[in-house]
Image: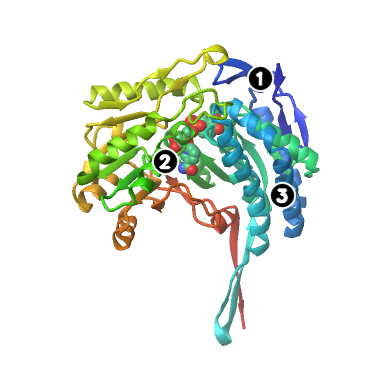
């Protein structure tokens, strides 16, 4: 059986205590690899290696750091088929999606920050005849990067690339549910000849390895993406240690459809925003609000398109929705479908598990599920489900839809469909969220700030925001 190894000080290592966890293929339900069940000893080794590498790495001209990152991007591109296959097997997502989105984006993350760092500059503030101030933005030290299972390599590299570009060294932990592409990345770093200790990847459980990274006294900066409850826990540890902390957390995003929208575009894009990656994207629009005058028309068109989606073997070209990433997550989603019924919702389509044949007979699959008839305040409409489940709710006025859209504890993203430009901007301004898409969904420009408000997180990733996060500004004042 394939054994995943830690990547510490430039070398692939067994976990110090020799313990492993089982890694399942969610589409077959079979254990297909072993993952290090690492301990504090491994985190300590990784942190020491990162500390040792720091003076060298942070002292390099940025052009040299940039070249290393570009080399890694090239190798990701070269191995994109292998990486996409590994991602699909490990996570359950359709192979076509991993090929089209996840792996190209991982390469783009490295390429973007390899070049962004070359343009990252600081200011001088002129005090006239009294002198001037200038600002130096220095790397911080060893950065801890912790990522979730839904977009494994995509989100892992979204943190690692800016941290390294800015001159930090890194101790990183991918999700224990989807460790494979992070392991393949460590092989790529070795092939690229990345100097030892610059990037260290420690595999294992969040409650052990994740916790040890967050509480390590020599890791002063933590970038975390994951659930809101985990984010709360991390804040409690990191805040009294005065660590710099970036938290990208959960979402319960509104998707608002006005009667004056481009109807076909709104339906097509809403299906994507609802069910891409089995609805396991923090940006999915899980609460669809539809203006009353087109409610029935939109509902019928949306359900028709949803029923055409193919739930199947992730490796099959025709598959739109693959397997649910883990059994625990499958159970959570199914419990919310049950709750929706208890809360008075009507299941318009889906609502059940799908049993596939052959090698996928033990996999966990759920039909794309559309529910109506629920109060906007009920738990189904307030809590993050993070699966292929959406609710439809009619609205009559702009005020009403804004009130319902903003009613959750979350504030990550929102989507608005209307052909009225003024209305689009007005609504976008009033949504309590870090991101708003108008007449589109998940169109990304890596230069833009990415993140949420309220319980969806603290801080922003993307563009120079991430380079600012992974550096400390120092003002130097020169007085004449
Ligand atoms: P999770 O919080 O369970 O785990 C995320 C990571 O944190 C994993 O690597 C896990 O091992 C680690 N972890 C768990 N407990 C920890 C602890 N005590 N200390 C340190 N690390 C710990 O989240 P998940 O289930 O992997 O991911 C799904 C969640 O992530 C959803 O809520 C989703 O909305 C969110 N998410 C947010 C964004 C965003 O950009 N805002 C993007 C993707 C996913």
Name the foreground residue: 3 vs 454.
Answer: 3
Task: Characterize the local packing of mark 3: few (<14), some (14-19) or many (20 or more) Cα atoms within 10 angstroms.
Answer: many
**Alpha-carbon distance for marks 3 and 1?**
28 Å
Task: Characterize the local packing of mark 2: few (<14), some (14-19) or many (20 or more) Cα atoms within 10 angstroms.
Answer: many
The secondary structure type at the circle numbered 2 is helix
Q: Residue at x 24, y 48 (%)?
A: 401
Dot 3 or dot 2: first in sequence order is 3
| Horizontal side of residue 86 vs 269, given as left or right | right
Name the foreground residue: 361 vs 228.
Answer: 361
| Horizontal side of residue 169 vs 452, given as left or right | right
Name the foreground residue: 449 vs 427.
Answer: 427
Residue 8 drawn at (x, y percent):
73, 34
Q: How is the image coloured?
A: rainbow
Residue 69: give its label: 3
The secondary structure type at the circle numbered 1 is strand
| Horizontal side of residue 127 vs 371, given as left or right | right
Please state which of the two labelled residues, at mark 2 or mark 1, is closer to the viewer.
2
Residue 69 drawn at (x, y percent):
71, 49
Which residue position is annotated with label 1?
A: 33
Dot 3 or dot 1: first in sequence order is 1
Which residue position is annotated with label 2?
A: 273
Task: Characterize the local packing of mark 1: few (<14), some (14-19) or many (20 or more) Cα atoms within 10 angstroms.
Answer: some
Residue 466 drawn at (x, y percent):
56, 53
């Amino acid at each position: 059986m394939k054994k995943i190894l830690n990547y510490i000080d430039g070398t692939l290592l067994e976990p110090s205590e020799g313990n492993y966890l089982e890694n399942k293929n969610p589409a077959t339900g079979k254990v297909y690899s072993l993952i290090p069940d690492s301990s504090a000893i491994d985190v300590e080794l990784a942190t020491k290696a990162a500390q040792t590498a720091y003076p060298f790495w942070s002292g390099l001209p940025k052009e040299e750091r940039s070249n290393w990152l570009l080399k890694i991007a090239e190798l990701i591109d070269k191995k994109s088929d292998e990486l996409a296959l590994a991602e699909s097997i490990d996570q359950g997502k359709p192979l076509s999606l991993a090929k089209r989105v996840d792996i190209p984006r991982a390469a783009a993350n490295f390429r973007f920050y390899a070049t962004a760092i070359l343009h990252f500059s600081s200011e001088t503030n002129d005090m006239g005849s009294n002198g001037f101030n200038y600002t130096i933005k220095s790397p911080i030290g060893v950065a801890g990067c912790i990522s979730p299972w839904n977009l494994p390599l995509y989100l892992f590299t979204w943190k690692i690339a800016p941290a390294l570009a800015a001159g930090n060294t890194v101790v990183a932990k991918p999700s224990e549910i989807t460790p494979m592409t992070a392991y393949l990345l460590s092989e790529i770093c070795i092939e690229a000849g990345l100097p030892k200790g610059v990037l260290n990847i420690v595999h294992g459980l969040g409650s052990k390895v994740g916790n040890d990274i967050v509480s390590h006294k020599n890791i002063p900066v933590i970038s975390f993406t994951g659930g809101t409850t985990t984010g709360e826990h991390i804040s409690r540890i990191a805040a009294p240690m005065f660590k710099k902390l970036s938290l990208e957390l959960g979402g319960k995003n509104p998707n608002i459809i006005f009667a004056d929208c481009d109807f076909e575009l709104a339906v097509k894009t809403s299906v994507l925003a609802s069910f891409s990656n089995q609805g396991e994207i923090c940006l999915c629009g899980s609460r669809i609000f539809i203006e009353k005058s087109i409610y029935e028309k939109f509902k019928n068109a949306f359900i028709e398109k949803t029923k055409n989606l193919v739930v199947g073997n992730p490796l099959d070209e025709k598959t739109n929705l693959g397997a649910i990433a883990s059994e625990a997550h499958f159970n959570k989603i199914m419990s919310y479908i049950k709750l929706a019924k208890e809360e008075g919702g009507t299941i318009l389509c889906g609502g059940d598990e799908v049993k596939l044949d052959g090698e996928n007979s033990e996999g966990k699959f759920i039909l794309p599920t559309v529910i109506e008839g629920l109060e906007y305040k009920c738990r189904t409409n307030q809590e993050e489900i993070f699966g292929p489940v959406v609710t439809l709710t009619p609205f009559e006025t702009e005020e009403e839809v804004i009130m319902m859209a903003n009613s959750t504890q979350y504030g990550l993203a929102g989507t608005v469909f209307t052909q009225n430009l003024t209305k689009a901007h007005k609504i976008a301004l009033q949504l309590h969220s870090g991101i708003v898409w108008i007449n589109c969904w998940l169109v990304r420009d890596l230069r833009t700030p990415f993140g949420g408000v309220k319980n969806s997180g603290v801080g922003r990733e993307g563009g120079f925001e991430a380079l600012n996060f992974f550096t400390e500004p120092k003002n130097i004042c020169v007085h004449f």
